[in-house]
Amino acid sequence: MSAELSRPASPERSLDELANLAEDVLARCRKQGASQAEVSLNLDRGLDVNVRMGEVETVEHTRDRSVSITVYFGGRKGSASTADVQPASIATSIDQACAIARHTEEDPCAGLADAARMATFFPDLDQWHPWALDAAHAIELGIAAEAAGRALDARLHNSDGASVSSGSSIGLYANTHGFLGRESGTRHTISCSLLGEDGSAMQRDYWYTTAVAREDLEPAEAVGRRAAERTLARLNPRKLGTRACPVLFAPEVARSLIGHLVGAVSGGALYRRASFLLDSVGERLFPDWFSILERPHLKRGAGSGAFDGEGVATVDSDLVRDGVLARYILGSYSARKLGLQSTGNAGGIHNLVVPANAGGFADLLRQLDTGFLITELMGQGVNTVTGDYSRGATGFWVERGVIAYPVDEVTIAGNLREMFRRIVAVGSDIDTRGAIRTGSILLESMMVAGE
C-alpha cells in the first residue's frame, strides 16, 4: 500500500487503493484454502481540541488505519486484524486467521451473508463534507463557545471545558461473493460543559452540536449560551417526594427508550434467550398510533448506509408498525441461529425515525400538565432479561404546563413493557444528532422515588 493512504487527499483515490488491497487479500485467503473470506479496511483521521477556562488543555491529531480479515473453512471461522498495512503484516494476519479457523469447532450458522442479499444500489447519501479545520481555528471556536456561555451570568464562574472535533472516515468492505462496498463520511462536533454555583450548591450541564457538514453545526457561541442556560436552570434544585406521576423525556434522553427496545429485539439477546421480548414479533407493544421506521438512505443521516456490515443491502422498513413489533434486528449469524433472514442490520441500526403525534416541546409540556420533565439519566439499571427499569434522573417539576423548579437526586422506575404501553405522545421537537431520531416522549405515569 502506498504512503498516500496515510494522507488521503480524496476519498475516491484512497478507496481505489483499498479496493486493490482488498482483492489481493481475498485472493490470498482463497489460496490458503478458505472457502469464504471477507475483509474490512478503514482509514480514519481527525482533530480534537479541548480548552478550559480560556486555555488549551489538549490538541490531538489522529490517523488510524485498520485491516480486519475473516476466513471460513466450511463452518469454521477465524479472524485477525492489524493496524499495519505493510504487506508482511497483512500476510501474517491472513496466516493467523487461517490458523484460528483450522482449530475452531464447526458452526453451521457461520459464513458470509447470502450472496443474493448483497447490495447493488449505492445512492449518494451526502456523507462527505471535509472541513479544513486547523488547531488554531479549533482552539478559537472552543474558547468562543466557553466564553459566550460564561459571559451569560456571574454564577457561571467555572467550566468543564469546551471541545471541537472534526474527523473523516474512509472504509471498504469486500467478500468472496464478489461484493465490494465503499463508504466515506465526515463528522464535526462542538460541545461545551459549564459549572454554575449559587450559594453552596453547584450544578453542571452541557450542550453540543454535531453534523456531517460544517454548515449544519450550530454556531460555537450558541452552543456555549445553550450550555449556560441549561446550567443556570438547574441551580437550587429541590427534592421530590416519592409518587407516581406523568413523565416527559426530553428529546436528548427520549432516544434511550428506543435504544432499550433495540437491545431487546437484537439477534444476540434473542438467540441467547436473554431478552424480555422473546417471540414478540406480531405482538402489540405500543399504542396503536406509534411506529418506528428505519430509513437507511437519509441524506446526511448519522446512521445512513447503503449496506450493512456484511454487505447486505439496506432498505426502508418498519420496526414497529401501528404499535406492533414488525420484525427483529438481525445480522446473518443471529438470523440463522433463529431460523430467520437477516434484516440488514449487521453492525447496527440505520436511522430509526419515530413519527410525532403531537406538537413541539411547549405543547408536550402543556399535555404533561403536572409531572416530571427528565433532562438527564444516570446509571445502567435496565435489565434486558426482565425489562425492569430503574435509573437516576434529574430534570424539572412542571405544574400546569409550566416548568416550576429543578429537581435532582430522584430515581424513576418501572418495567419497559408497561412503559412502552404508557406512551401517550411523541413530540415534533426531533433530535437529529444520532441514529435514533425522536422528539420528546410523554408517558402517562411512572414511579418517581425521591425523599
Image: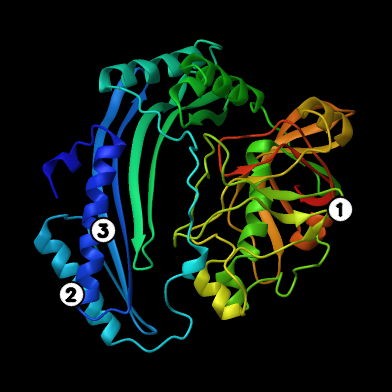
Viewer-side label of 3, 2: 3
For marks 3 and 1, give the CA distance.
Answer: 47 Å
Q: Are marks 3 and 2 in contact (CB under 8 Å)?
A: no
x 51%, y 28%: residue: 209
Residue topped by disc 1: 287
Seen in the picture, residue 270 relative to 257 is either above or below; the reply is below
Q: Nearer the viewer, residue 217 or 169?
A: 169
Closer to the chain start, of discs 3 and 2, is 3
Residue occupying the point 41% across, 14% down: 144
Q: Which residue lies under the disc numbered 2? A: 95
Q: Earlier in the sequence, mark 2 or mark 1?
A: 2
Indicate the secondary structure of the residue bearing disc 3.
Answer: helix
Quarter of the view holding residue 325: bottom right
The one of 227 and 127 positioned closer to us in this rendering = 127
Q: Is the residue under label 1 in contact with that under label 2 (CB below 8 Å)? A: no
Q: Nearer the viewer, mark 3 or mark 1?
A: 3
Q: Where does the image place residue 142, in percent across and percent down from the top left?
A: 39, 20
Q: Residues within 10 Å of mark 3 (few under 14, many from 20)?
A: many
Q: Position of residue 64 (x, y in %)?
A: 25, 46
